[in-house]
Image (cartoon, rainbow, N blue to C red):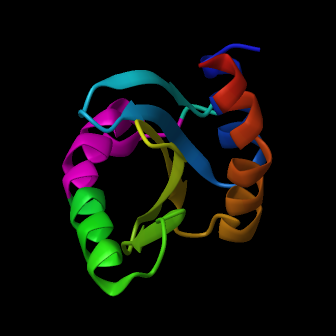
Amino acid sequence: MSFASILQTIVDNCGGGIAAALMGTDGIPIDQVTATAGPEGAMAEDISTAGVEFGRILEEIHKVSDSLAAGALSETMVSFSRFCLIFRIVDEDTFLVLAIGAGGNVGKARYLMRRHLLALREEM
């Protein structure tokens, strides 16, 4: 299974998915997809931009986690009025970002991201 097919499965099956990207922690997008239903708006066009910008925030969260001895970051979510961004750490060099509409099923999206982690790791 390719990165794109795994990402497409997550976006299309989570309920309200807009787009997803697999990002390197260096800010370089590895792969990205949009929902096959044809979402509209900036998130659908360039989710990797969100990954780059929020990637910096994830680095800061890692620093805070280290200083608090909280353990490794596994997931975080940022919720806006029009959509949510869910970030899931794949390994130390990559993370997954998923944009889901405001009325989307966040619980199912989180489940699918966790469920497909092993497949993403095996593709690397």
User: In the image shown, does 122 or 32 lie closer to the viewer?
Assistant: 122
Q: Is residue 88 above or below residue 1?
A: below
Say which residue appears at 63% left-offset and 31% top-offset: 7
User: In the image shown, does 105 or 22 lie closer to the viewer?
Assistant: 22
Say if the magenta span includes residue 75.
no
Q: Is residue 28 above or below residue 95?
A: above
Say which residue appears at 28% left-offset and 25% top-offset: 28
Q: Position of residue 63 (x, y in %)?
A: 24, 68
Can residue 43 be spotted in the picture? yes
Image-based side of 18 in relation to 50, left or right: right
Q: Is residue 19 above or below residue 6?
A: below
User: In the image shown, does 62 or 42 lie closer to the viewer?
Assistant: 62
Say which residue appears at 26% left-offset and 54% top-offset: 54
**Image quarter of the N terminus:** top right
The quarter of the picture where residue 107 lies is bottom right
Image-based side of 118 in relation to 41, left or right: right
Residue stretch in magenta: 39-56
SS assignment for the magenta stretch, majority: helix
Q: Position of residue 123 (x, y in %)?
A: 66, 18
Say if the magenta span includes residue 48.
yes
Say which residue appears at 32% left-offset and 44% top-offset: 51
Q: Position of residue 10 (x, y in %)?
A: 70, 40
Can residue 41 be spotted in the picture? no
